[in-house]
């Protein structure tokens, strides 16, 4: 029986492995031996510079003898997210994706968008709209990011518009390495949100408008001063929330979600699972919403 013709795009871990086959592979697949699994663990540990070998679970052996693996670091199970890798039939090459080119690419894209759509809305709190809205928008943002501030001006009118066809959720994805006060601001936003969406919108407006003058040292005092001017806002309830772990856990949940969808930048907006990075201009955003409301041929995650 002829062997499948396989083409590697890029290099291991960076590219995809595509199999071109004239007929199904009928040979018996070779099982991964314990020694091979151990070797894989040490290889991934060394390549990813992990402090200890990761946990590897064999999810399934596919019909073409590619083995689907789930890999998760052990040192921080709470924050780590499993990633999928594929081991080739000869057990010598690893790839992040395997495509069957006999399948219509639009079907593959649609499946990926549906997967992302489920992931990004899971655990997200909607600021407007319902779960059944035909257009689901999820934004990953950072209060200290200037591009997020720019996109906020594009998004803001939709958060108060009376359009039942759109649901919008905001998720926190602070870049803690370069934005020192963004994480605490995200926690503050979760506590403010508990007292109503209008308070959250007001705080978000203020944080984005005052990015250049907010610092790690003055954030708490300036936010407290701002909130005191908000009619009906319960300052004591806010302080109680800030001292509890609940809001921090919500931010951690948003960050975990960002890792699960392999977020590469903020802001990133997902519209029915279609991810677009950067400060999307108003007209472009309007077009994307219109496309999401009608059947279309998608191109997946845009660069």
Image (tube, grey):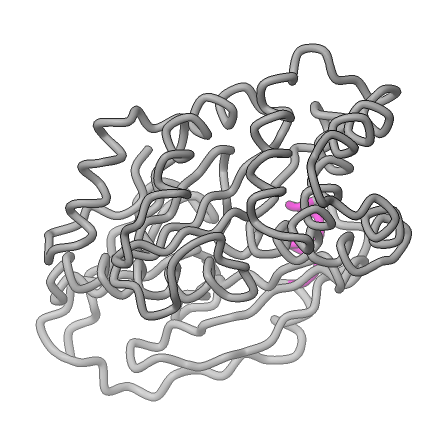
Left or right? Give the position of 217 relative to 154.
right
- In this picture, which residue range is highlighted in magenta? 41-48
State which quadrant residue 207 falls in: top right
Residue 89 position within the rendered picture, expressed as x and y whole percent measured from the top left: 39, 71
Does residue 80 sit above or below 149 in this rendering?
below
Going by the picture, which residue comes out furthest to the front? 231
User: Which secondary structure dominates the residues rendered in magenta?
Assistant: helix
Residue 261 position within the rendered picture, expressed as x and y whole percent measured from the top left: 48, 53
Left or right? Give the position of 273 relative to 1.
right
Give the residue displayed 85% in from the left and 58% down from the top: 245
Q: Is residue 102 magenta?
A: no
Give the residue displayed 40% in from the left and 43% down from the top: 160
Give the residue displayed 43% in from the left and 56% down from the top: 95
Residue 202 position within the rendered picture, expressed as x and y whole percent measured from the top left: 59, 34
Residue nearer the viewer, 163 or 218: 163
Left or right? Give the position of 276 relative to 12.
left
Residue nearer the viewer, 106 or 249: 249
Give the residue displayed 47% in from the left and 67% down from the top: 91
Residue nearer the viewer, 293 or 227: 227
State which quadrant residue 185 falls in: top right
Residue nearer the viewer, 113 or 127: 127
Residue 146 position within the rendered picture, expressed as x and y whole percent measured from the top left: 54, 19
Q: Quadrant of the N terminus?
A: bottom left
Does residue 281 sit above or below 141 in this rendering?
above
């Amino acid at each position: 029986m002829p062997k499948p013709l396989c083409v590697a795009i890029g290099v291991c871990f960076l590219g995809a492995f595509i199999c071109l086959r004239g007929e199904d592979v009928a040979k018996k697949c070779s099982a991964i031996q314990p020694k091979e699994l151990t070797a894989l663990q040490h290889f991934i540990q060394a390549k990813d510079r992990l402090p200890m070998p990761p946990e590897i679970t064999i999810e399934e052996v596919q019909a073409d003898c590619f083995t689907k693996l789930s890999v998760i670091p052990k040192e921080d199970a709470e924050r780590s997210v499993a990633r999928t890798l594929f081991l080739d039939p000869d057990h010598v090459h690893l790839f992040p994706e395997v495509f069957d080119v006999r399948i219509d690419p639009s079907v593959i894209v649609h499946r990926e968008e549906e997967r992302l759509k489920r992931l990004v809305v899971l655990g997200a709190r909607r600021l407007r709209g319902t779960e059944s809205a035909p257009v689901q928008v999820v934004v990953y943002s950072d209060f200290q990011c200037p591009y997020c501030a720019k996109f906020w001006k594009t998004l803001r009118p939709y958060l108060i518009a009376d359009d039942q066809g759109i649901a919008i959720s905001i998720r926190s994805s602070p870049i803690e390495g370069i934005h020192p006060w963004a994480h605490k601001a995200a926690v503050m936003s979760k506590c403010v949100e508990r007292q109503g969406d209008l308070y959250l919108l007001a705080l978000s407006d203020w944080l984005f408008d005052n990015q250049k003058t907010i610092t790690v040292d003055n954030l708490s005092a300036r936010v407290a001063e701002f909130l005191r001017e908000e009619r009906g806002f319960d300052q004591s309830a806010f302080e109680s929330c800030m001292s509890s772990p609940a809001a921090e856990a919500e931010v951690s949940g948003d960050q975990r979600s960002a890792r699960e969808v392999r977020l590469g930048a903020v802001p990133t907006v997902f519209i029915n699972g279609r991810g677009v990075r950067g400060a999307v201009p108003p007209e472009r955003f309007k077009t994307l919403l219109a496309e999401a409301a009608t059947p279309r041929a998608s191109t997946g995650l845009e660069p």
